[in-house]
Image: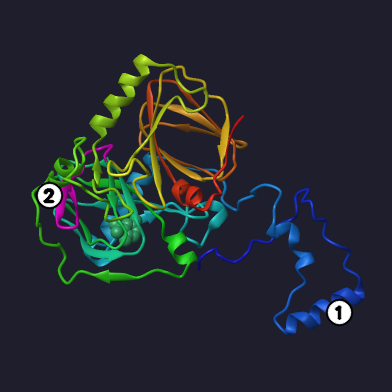
Amino acid sequence: MYNRSHRMKEPRGDIHARPETSAPRRDFYARLDKKNLAPVWEVLGDLFPVEPHPSCVPALWKYSELRPLLLEAAGLITAEEAQRRVLALDNPGLRGCTQITQSLYAGVQLLLPGEIAPSHRHVSSALRFVIESKGAYTAVNGERTTMHPGDFILTPSWTFHDHGNEGDSPAIWLDGLDFPIVNFFDAGFIERYPEASQPVMRREGDAVARYGTNLLPLEYEAESLTSPIFNYPYARSREALHLLSRNSAPHPCHGFKMQYANPATGGYPMPTIAAFLQFLPSGFLGAASRSTDGTVFCCTEGHGRSRVGASVFEWTEHDIFVVPSWCPVAHEASADAVLFSFSDRPAQKALGFWREHLV
Ligand code: GTQ
């Protein structure tokens, strides 16, 4: 199911032109094939592209279309039966893979009032970006955090997590998971907790008090590759961006863009996934840029448009779009706008792959 086999594509000006296929060569290749052997010179241009040419394509999902379909799903299956009642955002270039980019998955999850998404843990790290919630929570490692719209919430690798909606309206959020990376390595495990909800061991806010107030426990040394705070509240992040926008000039491509940080290390919040928040003031006309980390964007406020390769995506609140690796993107805001985004940048940087080009 996973898109891990090499993709065969027409070479695009690759430095290695495919040699002529003569009859004796074809015959030889057929004999090789029977022995599970293959001539590398036939595929060299595909194996080593001059620059990335991903199967992932630019795509946009309008929230006005997503939301009614999610509610329709709730009429067909409960959160309990589904375990996770999520509509995956399947990249049109990667159909059948349940992936939004080559390395990441994204989906929109719904919990009706009173529902619980039962507790489990998996190797895959996850993030939640909250779209609608009045009284829903996520529990991680014995602590619950209330989900507010715009909050960025983490589920570290191999930690039990369950979600519940104690409010009286539907709770909807964007999920981002790295399981395409985990499955690429065939390193995936999952375990169910014996009950729907894990026991609450600590009062809400404990992690923020311990790690999220510019203080750390005495002589603290990070025990995990993931940030010890698991909710980055929107109100604080938004306020920071607005303040910065009054004190400095916007980046020509990114506007006022910040990355979420692990307060214990200053690094990315998770080993495989980076997340960002950017403020684009009304009238902002961004220059194009591109980078090797295919990126998922979700608009939290305002409206505008992004040129992504040959596509133009008009977005407004809660619309989600994806920018493939090395595809130029330029953002414009027609009203003060905030975009959340996430990508596999930490994984690429750890391996020395990541590149960015400001056009
Ligand atoms: O909340 O743990 O969108 O396990 C897909 C799989 C969310 C989750 C998804 C999951 C989860």
Residue 47, can we see it?
Answer: yes
Question: Which is in the foreground here, disc 2 or disc 1?
Answer: 1
Q: Which residue is mark 2?
A: 166
Q: Quadrant of ligand 1?
A: bottom left
Residue found at x 26% / y 57%:
75
- Indicate the position of residue 32 as horizontal and vertical percent values: 77, 81
Q: Secondary structure at mark 2?
A: loop
Give the Cα distance between marks 2 and 1. Answer: 67 Å
Residue found at x 57% / y 53%:
93
Quadrant position of residue 289: top right
Residue 309 lies, with reference to residue 177, above or below; the image says above
Q: Which residue is mark 1?
A: 27
Residue 246 lies, with reference to residue 60, above or below; the image says above
- Residue range in magenta is 136-151
Residue 101 sits inside the magenta stretch: no
Q: Is mark 1 within 8 Å of ligand 1?
A: no
Q: Secondary structure at mark 1?
A: helix
Q: Nearer the viewer, residue 47 or 223?
A: 223
